Amino acid sequence: MCIKTYLPALIVLATCQQALPQDFGQLRAEMVSQQLEPRGINHTPTLEAMRKVERHRFVPPACQQDAYRDTPLPIGYGQTISQPFMVAMMTQLLQPGPDDRILEIGTGSGYQAAILAEMTGEVYTMEIIPQLGAKAKQLLSELGYRNVTVIVGDGYNGWAEKAPYDAIIVTAAPEEVPPPLIAQLKEGGKIIVPIGAQTEEQTLVLIEKRNGELVKTALIPVRFVPFTRSKDMP
Ligand code: SAH
């Protein structure tokens, strides 16, 4: 069972009750052809990764039958794996090159990191909840991803050890872009980040560093889990 204790998550829980055996490969192909391609996802490496990576491995067993529906799902600790379309769109916006070094803030289940790892050189992904970080690390290793490093820590500070990054993707919503992330972005690099308080509408923002200047483009309204800080943790 995906046990949750608060209302929004109960709504998510309600989507995790089917128990029919499914052909996950077929469902994954349909996810791409019915949910992603018709909505403008056309970046070939993104589509290939979405066809290949087994999203059902990244969700709790009771939610596996729903893994290829266009919905976020609970992954424990009050967190969610983003809906497939959002993962695909953010990946397509970043368009990682084959030799790029990417930093992700918000490992969660590890699914977005796996999608990125399919098409790029190195992925560094940070998770503030130790149990989620440990679980994602184990799964990504079991699945054979040698180019993903999971770091447990507060992503506000980024990961200076491997900076600068060609691209940074943030999958929890801060109210402002953490300055260390901007400092750790390469010239010509991109950050994709949902910005906004939990009580307000959040906006997905693309930030490009050009000649040392930041060029910001507001994209679409979105809803992500909060970007938390170590000091806020229980
Ligand atoms: N990308 C994930 C979904 C992430 S949900 C996936 O593919 O499954 C957002 C995650 O960000 C949560 O797991 C949350 O714990 C984490 N998070 C929130 N604030 C953070 C911070 N300051 N540093 C690192 N991780 C953070």
Image: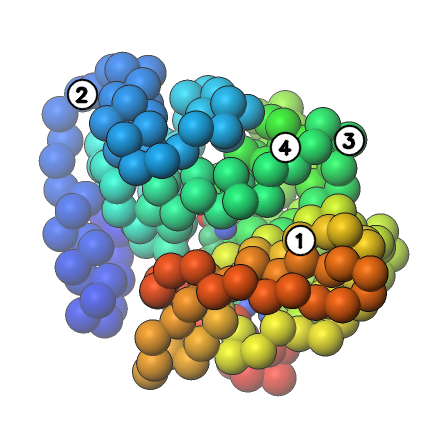
Q: Position of residue 114 (x, y in %)?
A: 56, 35
Give the number of the mark in front: 3 or 1. Answer: 1
Q: Earlier in the sequence, mark 2 or mark 1?
A: 2
- How many neighbours does mark 4 have within 10 angstroms: few (below 14), some (14-19), or many (20 or more)? many
Q: What is the quadrant of residue 79 in the picture? A: bottom left
- How many neighbours does mark 1 have within 10 angstroms: few (below 14), some (14-19), or many (20 or more)? many
Indicate which disc residue 117 carries: 4
Residue pointed to by mark 3? 99
Q: Give the Cα separation between the discs numbered 2 and 1.
A: 41 Å
Local secondary structure at mark 2: loop
Give the number of the mark in front: 4 or 3. Answer: 3
Give the number of the mark in front: 2 or 4. Answer: 4
Q: Earlier in the sequence, mark 3 or mark 2?
A: 2
Indicate which disc residue 190 carries: 1
Q: The disc labelled 3 sits on which kind of residue? A: Asp
Tag 2 near tag 1, CB within 8 Å: no
Q: What is the quadrant of residue 105 in the picture? A: bottom right
Q: The disc labelled 4 sits on which kind of residue? A: Ala
Local secondary structure at mark 4: helix
Q: Residue at x 63, y 32 (%)?
A: 117
CB of residue at label 3: within 8 Å of ligand 1? Answer: no
Residue 203, relative to residue 161: is it above or below? below
Q: Give the Cα separation between the discs numbered 3 and 2.
A: 39 Å
- How many neighbours does mark 2 have within 10 angstroms: few (below 14), some (14-19), or many (20 or more)? few
Q: Give the Cα separation between the discs numbered 4 and 1.
A: 17 Å
Q: Earlier in the sequence, mark 2 or mark 4?
A: 2
CB of residue at label 4: within 8 Å of ligand 1? Answer: no
Indicate which disc residue 203 carries: none
Q: Earlier in the sequence, mark 3 or mark 1?
A: 3
Residue pointed to by mark 2? 21
Q: Give the Cα separation between the discs numbered 3 and 1.
A: 15 Å
